[in-house]
Amino acid sequence: MASRHRAVAAVGHRPDGQFHLRRRSEKRSHHRRSIAGAIRRAGTFYVAGGLVDQWSGHWVGAGADDIVGLHRGGHELACHTFSHTRAVALDSAALAMEMESNRRYFLSLDPSIRLENFAYPYGLGSLPRKRQLGKAFRSSRGIVPGVNSGIVDLHYLRATPLIDGQIGAEGIDRAFDEAVATNGWLIFYSHDVDAAPSPYGCSPSLLRHALEAARSRNIPVLTVADALRRAGA
């Protein structure tokens, strides 16, 4: 295992899977509750505090009660920038302020919430910001698809879209088969789940297929925090 400050780790004990959701929609809340129930205690929800209860153009962001409910239900809450501004658009001081604003927001909801992991808004990172995030979080996730295997950059984790129009059942199966073959860490991300999802979301049937694909291959579904602990990273 490489030292943590170098932001790399060796992965190779057995394949893992994660399902990440970045916002909850009030009009789709029944589907999002079903997600949380389906993946039990293994969901990671990245939240930008400044978007809580705000209209995005496709959905209304989660409410504070929803966020607290996820935390108390055993799911992991993780960090975006507070305003969902791209990390590459921020200098060091501005990114530090965004992170602190998000942390303070979560603490105002429930003092037991701890943000251990980060996701780059829009998937965009830079080397200076990656180094800065490496001092503040255990990991940072991008949106470059693929399996994390071998020597893994913990501050630019690969993640595969679980988004209708970008992946189907065959693509999901191939991703899981690669995770098994490489003994790797497969991360899926999406924004909403609905029979008519947004351009950034998925249908309940696609989510069910992914969950069944993990189950049939005996791949445990973990939060990012739990997967890192399991890997000793």
Image (cartoon, rainbow, N blue to C red):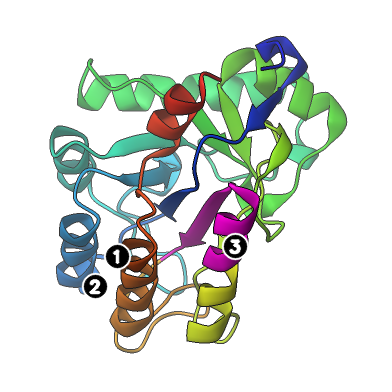
Percent from the top left, x then y, of residue 176? 52, 65
Question: Closer to the N terminus: mark 1 or mark 3?
Answer: 1
Q: Quadrant of residue 55?
A: bottom left
Of residues 51 and 213, the one drawn nearer to the viewer in this rendering: 213
Q: Which residue in the structure is indicated by mark 3?
A: 160
Which three-letter amino acid code belongs to the residue tagged 3? Thr
Q: Residue furthest right?
A: 127
Q: Is residue 207 visible?
A: yes
Could you classify mark 2 by the number of other residues whose Cα lies within 10 Å: few (under 14), some (14-19), or many (20 or more)? some
Residue at coordinates 84% horizontally, 25% vertically from top-left?
128
**Quadrant into which the C terminus falls:** top right
In-image side of 73 versus 201 (left or right): left
Q: Is residue 81 visible?
A: no
Percent from the top left, x then y, of residue 40? 19, 50
Residue at coordinates 35% horizontally, 77% vertically from top-left?
209
Q: Which residue in the structure is indicated by mark 2?
A: 28
In-image side of 89 versus 195 (left or right): right
Q: Quadrant of residue 104?
A: top left
Q: Which residue in the structure is indicated by mark 1?
A: 25
48 shown above or below 118? below
Residue range in magenta is 176-191
Residue at coordinates 14% horizontally, 33% vertically from top-left?
72
Q: CA distance from mark 1 to mark 2?
A: 5 Å
In-image side of 173 versus 30 (left or right): right
Percent from the top left, x then y, of residue 120? 64, 43
Which three-letter amino acid code belongs to the residue tagged 1? Ser
Q: CA distance from mark 1 to mark 3?
A: 21 Å
Percent from the top left, x then y, of residue 192? 37, 68
Q: Nearer the viewer, mark 1 or mark 3?
A: 3
